[in-house]
Image (spheres, rainbow, N blue to C red):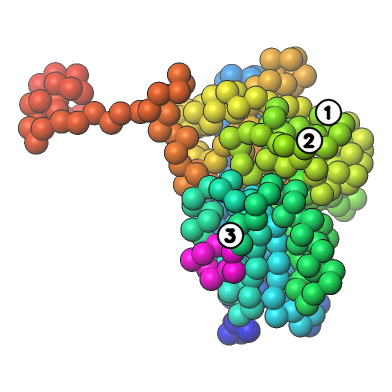
Amino acid sequence: MPAEYTPRPNSRQWRGVLREYADRLDISDATPVITLGEGGTPLIPAAALSARTGANVFVKFEGMNPTGSFKDRGMTMAISKAVEHGAKAVICASTGNTSASAAAYATHAGIQAVVLVPEGKIAMGKLSQAIAHNAQLLQVQGNFDDCLEIARDLATNYPVHLVNSVNPDRIEGQKTAAFEVVEVLGDAPDFHIVPVGNAGNYTAYHRGYTEELKRGESTKQPRMFGFQAAGSAPLVLGHPVKNPDTIASAIRIGNPASWDLALNARADSDGYFGAIDDTHILEAHRILSAEVGIFVEPASAISVAGLLERSAAGVIPAGATVVLTVTGHGLKDPQWALRTADGSDVQPTIVPVDVKAIAEVLGLAAGAGA
Ligand SMILES: *Cc1c(COP(=O)(O)O)cnc(C)c1O
């Protein structure tokens, strides 16, 4: 168990979602707070995206969480509850970020994490995190959907606690992101756009917004728009995809665990599921990093691609408030920044140790500095 401490309520340090939203989560005095300070992520106005669409666009940058993805919001809840119930080991299947998060929170709590990942299919940053945080990591010779089936089976028949988003504690923790958006904007946005893999996060935002509306904190239910990669778009197609394929490894999922919950959320919010091909995902990735200053992993960029696609389709009215969740940090899977639009490698310019030569390369004329 971590040392007990009580951060001063008015200190500027964010206290993590369990403490910040204690009254809105199913926890009690008996629940240990296993936190790395997740949540409280910035909602960043994206002038370049507003200019492109005529809407009022904000980016919820979930890469700013402790392990670099939104998974930490659900994991603080899932691991705290697991420890409350005496678990000594947790298990998850993962495309990478769940394993990184489970590993960090489990080790912080002093328990073991077991993670099942598809062999050769997860980004190096995420693999490094799980190993660094002392998880027992097994690369399964199958895809994510196979990993999840095995994890569920093991959790049913052996003494390990499942922390995938089929664990309801995960979605409960993740709904806090919607609370933060409403707090910052003073109301819910008109549209909220998220990447969709297992559809747990899509479901979580919808739940968070629904609770805000009920409490009178907001005046509307945002239309929930979820985007899947074209090669991995079961919710768009209406049936599972056997061999999901996309560069966006975090959403390479053929049979979403929260399928039914997500369909309900779509229906309730007048929502939408769309598919985006990898070329447009990478184009959006470049726009977000080069024009807005936010570096994300490819799966996260699909929110931006989805906005541009829906805007071009005439669905997003001028002046509408749109929040895009970008789910994971670019440093987890940085290789995509080093490719040009035509697919060739970016070659950094090499220069000698010579001011004049460098000024020439930069096209600077001699004169006083500004
Ligand atoms: C997990 C994850 C997703 C997908 O979230 P779901 O809740 O499975 O739909 C998207 N992007 C990133 C970076 C993720 O880690």
Which of the marked residues, 2 or 3, is nearer the chain's N terminus? 3
Residue situated in front as seen by the camera: 365 or 205:
205
What residue is rendered at 76% in x and 32% in y? 233
Tell me the number on the disc at residue 226. Answer: none
Q: Quadrant of the N terminus?
A: bottom right
Task: Give the vertical position of 88 relative to 181 (above or below).
Answer: below
Q: Which residue is mark 3?
A: 100
Picture coordinates of residue 348 (x, y %)?
A: 28, 31
Q: Residue furthest front?
A: 141
Q: Disc 3 on helix, strand or loop? A: helix
Amino acid identity at mark 1: Leu
Task: Give the vertical position of 55 relative to 160 (above or below).
Answer: above
Where residue 28 sits, quadrant-wise, is: bottom right
Tell me the number on the disc at residue 237. Answer: 1
Picture coordinates of residue 190 (x, y %)?
A: 77, 32
The answer to whether the residues at label 1 and label 3 have Cβ atoms under 8 Å apart is no
Stretch in magenta: 130-137
Asked whether residue 143 is in view, the answer is: yes
Q: Disc 1 on helix, strand or loop? A: helix
The answer to whether the residues at label 2 and label 1 have Cβ atoms under 8 Å apart is yes
Q: Is residue 175 left or right of residue 229?
A: right
Asked whether residue 60 is in view, the answer is: no
Q: Disc 2 on helix, strand or loop? A: loop
Amino acid identity at mark 2: Val
What residue is rendered at 53% in x and 31% in y? 285
Near mark 2 (Cα within 10 A), the count class, few <14, some 14-19 or many ≥20, is some
What residue is rendered at 47% in x and 47% in y? 331
Q: Quadrant of the C terminus?
A: top left
Q: Which residue is mark 2?
A: 241
Task: Give the vertical position of 215 relative to 356 (above or below).
Answer: below
